Image (cartoon, grey):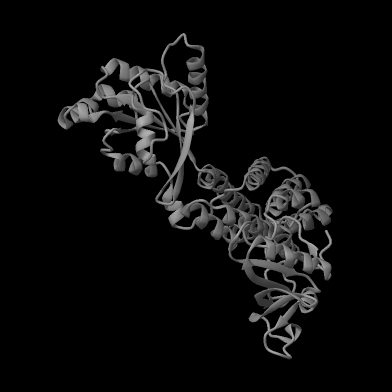
Amino acid sequence: MITDDTICAISTAQGMGAIAVIRIAGPNALLVCKKVFTPAKAGKKISEQKANTIHFGKISDGDKDIDEVLVSLFRSPHSFTGDDIIEIACHGAPYIQQQILQLLTKNGARLALPGEFTQRAFLNGKMDLSQAEAVADLIASRSEAARRVALQQMRGGFSSELIHLRERLLWFISMIELELDFSEEDVEFANRDELIGLVNEIEQHLSRLVNSFALGNAIKNGIPVAIAGHTNAGKSTLLNALLNEERAIVSDIHGTTRDAIEDTINIQGITFRFIDTAGIRTTADKIESLGIELTYSKIKQAAIILLMVDVTDPDEKIHTAISEIMTKMELERQQLIVVVNKTDLSDEASIQKRFSQTQFTEITGQNSVVPLSAKYKVNLDKLTDELLRTINLQAVDNDEVIVTNARHHEALSNALESILRVKEGLHNGISGDFLAQDIREVLHYLGSITGQISTDEILGNIFKHFCIGK
């Protein structure tokens, strides 16, 4: 990629606004700006001004004034990309933005590619690859938890942990390779007991990071919650109550919902993606049968399943509904919350007595039971508390490293497999050259995350998904 030319782009969102910011970066950023910008103070030259200063003036195309603007100046190497950077704050009319952009390209700049500013920051050593990817995650964050995780990664929390592990492994592999140079003398520079301890430590670190992806991916994309149950249990009513709007049709007629209806809600910084599904029952209606098939599909995709049961149903029907759902679940991966609906049709004492019975708790196991009235929005707070309990919020609150990127997860999984081979090799006493090969694989996968080992294909795939101007 060419990084010695000067690029420009609109960095604010498309459309009309109060102001817009146009960014110029590269060795000739000051020269391009000088050609189009006239400071309000006579005799003042933008190229002679100090870094991190703001200047008022006008953008002109010859004798034609285009707009009055503020120009911010950042000098190399102390800027976002490491280049000289000019940021022009103009009025937010799309016409003005395009006029200024065309003027910049006419005077020596070219339009930036998607993510090119951040890619330059990476290539100039201002951030590593995982930090660059966190920039995109921060821009796209839709909840408090997603923002906090992305910000923590952008500040280098994830990178520093990987770099520390990699440096320790590099020292050991250098000792092992030194042994290979003196193989005829049968010497041991790398203490195998220390290496075993390091391998065990790295295995624990990698396992924790790999396992954190389930939470990280849910935080980033929203936690899928399937609302399932028999017909007329109140699934659509619950969705409407949670969203506080009439999102789904509610009717006493069985089989009203025939398709999956989805919407999101933010609860204490966590985005939950609720999916109202068709009621489960035996039916000859082909359309409703397709809806029920879709229900089972959505149940498999969900991280949390809210099983709606009717408080007026007999125990046998409720037990059957729970058993049916649990046979469709992956119990290691999915959480079940049994929602006992329509509590307004029964008294609290009898509900408490009935659903705390041994025969009921035996079938639900460790899964939660929440009685509520979706119609009258009673005990919805208890349900939201239960939803939050299923998420490891402590990890977010403590700013622990949480993996949110699928590319990172794949690399970490491969690194974990390699470190397990190192562990097995140490246990079996394999020779140093085979041991070194497995350690190199671990180093390769860890380095590919931070960009210490990268290819043009990987870089192109990452930065093409960025917005232009970032």
Check the picture and name the quadrant holding the N terminus. Answer: bottom right
Front residue of 18 and 258: 18
| Residue at 28% over, 24% down | 360
In-image side of 398 versus 234 (left or right): right
Residue 244, given in percent of the width and then of the height, sits at 36, 41
Q: Quadrant of residue 234?
A: top left
Instruction: Answer whether residue 389 is visible to the viewer in this image.
Output: yes
Residue 276, given in percent of the width and then of the height, sits at 44, 30
Instruction: Answer whether residue 366 is visible to the viewer in this image.
Output: no
Residue 356, given in percent of the width and then of the height, sits at 23, 29
Front residue of 289 and 451: 289
Look at the picture and state if 368 lies above or below 159. Answer: above
Front residue of 123 and 423: 123
- Residue at the front extreme of this rendering: 64
- Residue at the top extreme of this rendering: 284
Q: Quadrant of residue 49?
A: bottom right
Front residue of 232 and 101: 101
Look at the picture and state if 334 lies above or below 429. Answer: above
In-image side of 28 versus 226 (left or right): right
Residue 442, given in percent of the width and then of the height, sits at 69, 49
Check the picture and name the quadrant holding the C terminus. Answer: bottom right
Look at the picture and state if 106 lies above or below 165. Answer: below
**Numbered circles on residues, count:** 0
- Residue at the bottom extreme of this rendering: 43
| Residue at 72% over, 66% down | 125
